[in-house]
Image (spheres, rainbow, N blue to C red):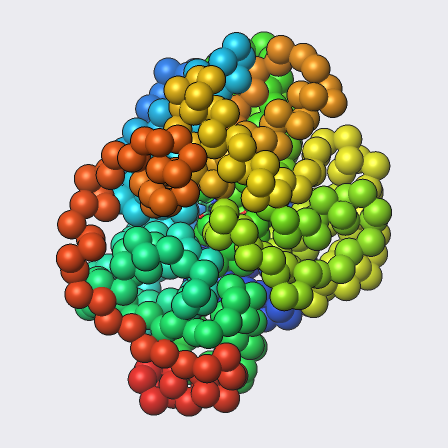
Amino acid sequence: MTLLFHSTNRMVDEVPVGIALLQGQAGDKGLFMPNSVPQLSAELLKRARDLSYPELAVEILWPYVEGTFSRDEIEEICHSAYDFEVPLENVTGNQFLMRLDQGPTASFKDFAARFMGRSLGKLVARRGKDLLILTATSGDTGSAVASAFLGVPGIKVLVLFPEDEVSNRQRKQMTTLGDNIATLALPGKFDDCQALVKQAFSDSDLTDLNLSSANSINIGRLLPQSVYYTYSASRLADIAGGEKVVFSVPSGNFGDMMGGMLAMQSGLPIEKFVIATNANDEVPLFLETGSYSKLAPSKVCISNAMNVGHPSNLARLVSLYGGHMDEVGKLTKPADMEKMRNELFAISISDQETRATIKSVYENHNTMLEPHGAVGWAGMMRYFDANPSDITAISLETAHPAKFPDEVRTLTGCEPVLPPSLEGIEELEELYGELPVDYEAFKSFLVREYK
Ligand SMILES: *Cc1c(COP(=O)(O)O)cnc(C)c1O
């Protein structure tokens, strides 16, 4: 059985996962979504807690990739990609922190990037045609993708980043690799980088470059991000008996949260998704008012990987609730807002509240958060302020505190311990190009370097 994927714009043919992965964005500028979400069987819900992370990933991902990869291939992908811990930390009462920061680049983006690097590596080898991955990053996608694709034959990666909005460590993680990984600094915002990348995808002059995307417009980002929701819930609640949990997801482009939505659609019992943004509050406002306008320019916040003024996954969210949003953010068919408000609690958290949260969670519970995880935690606290209960709740910590040492040190008085993957990075030599925020300049660069 091969599951097919359609575009949210519904103007191109349905395709199997291999094609969706290679294309990134659909030809009609829509986003690929599975025609149906494979259901977690009662039997899998029951034994999920006994499976290791990679074993569970195989079970969850198999129905999406069957027909494109063999069972052996998906096993190899998952076992080599997920060879690190996924700690579930009890912070207080029934409230937990899921640390998704133990991968090689110390952010949750490793979960998707490592799946994609391995999957695309296999698909490109099979097809025999090289691929150029274009990726815009607000900080962590670039390093995760660069690390996951480093040395993969047949694939080149070009990462665009806003020069003033990524931290030193984030930048060094992607500019020091070399080999098939190139990087470009732009004097703009993440949204500017993303706009250039999107324009290149729809430029017919560039078709023969075989462009693809590793941004969360690629469905390959979302599928693996659905696994850790089921993993954590299976260990902390009786999911086979229908016990529900609350998740809190610090969100920017809403790829992480869409992974969670897939988990919910697959039958994981979830009471509520708290979606916590920083001051870029266009989605909380959308939920509140039912009308959407993007924030341009996006606001600069300390949780820099979430400085997104027009989240690329919003069209997917709208489509899950029966509506249609086109690629520029125009709602052409309304979504079921009542259902959405029932299932989601969206909240915007200021930098001030983010900092206060890092400080108080450290002082009260001896748990170290970084700015993104703190936005998630603060959002969860706001949810429980409004809806007191002792239901099991899991907040996602999406990066390692050592990626944001200055903020964390100032607020906790404690130096976050560097994970082994970040050690020695300060001394490595950096290499990156620079371009203005200008499509013609970007296009000439692509033609010159890659044609
Ligand atoms: C990318 C990122 C986010 C936001 O994830 P989205 O899928 O874009 O919502 C949150 N935290 C960190 C550390 C990130 O790198």
Task: Give the percent coordinates (x, y) of residue 235.
Answer: 44, 16
- In the image, residue 148 sits, relative to residue 347, either above or below, namely below
Q: Quadrant of residue 167?
A: bottom left
Task: Please determine whether, in this image, residue 105 is positioned above or below residue 213.
Answer: above
Left or right: 390, with 123 as reference point: right
Q: Toward the viewer: 159 or 434?
A: 434
At horizontal 52% and vertical 83% (from top left) the residue drawn is 439
Question: In the rendered image, which quarter contains the C terminus?
Answer: bottom left
Q: Residue at x 39, y 38 (%)?
A: 410
176 sits to left or right of 3: left
| Residue 76 location (% of width, % of height) | 27, 41
Q: Quadrant of residue 312?
A: bottom right
Residue 227 in view, yes or no: no
> Looking at this view, is 405 or 154 the one in front?
405
Image coordinates of residue 347 in percent, x first then y, are 68, 38
Q: Position of residue 409 (x, y in %)?
A: 35, 37
Instruction: Establish if 431 lies above or below 47.
Output: below
Relative to 343, is 46 on the left or the right?
left
Task: Say whether residue 372 is visible.
Answer: yes
Question: Which residue is found at the position 62% from the left and 32% from the top?
Answer: 379
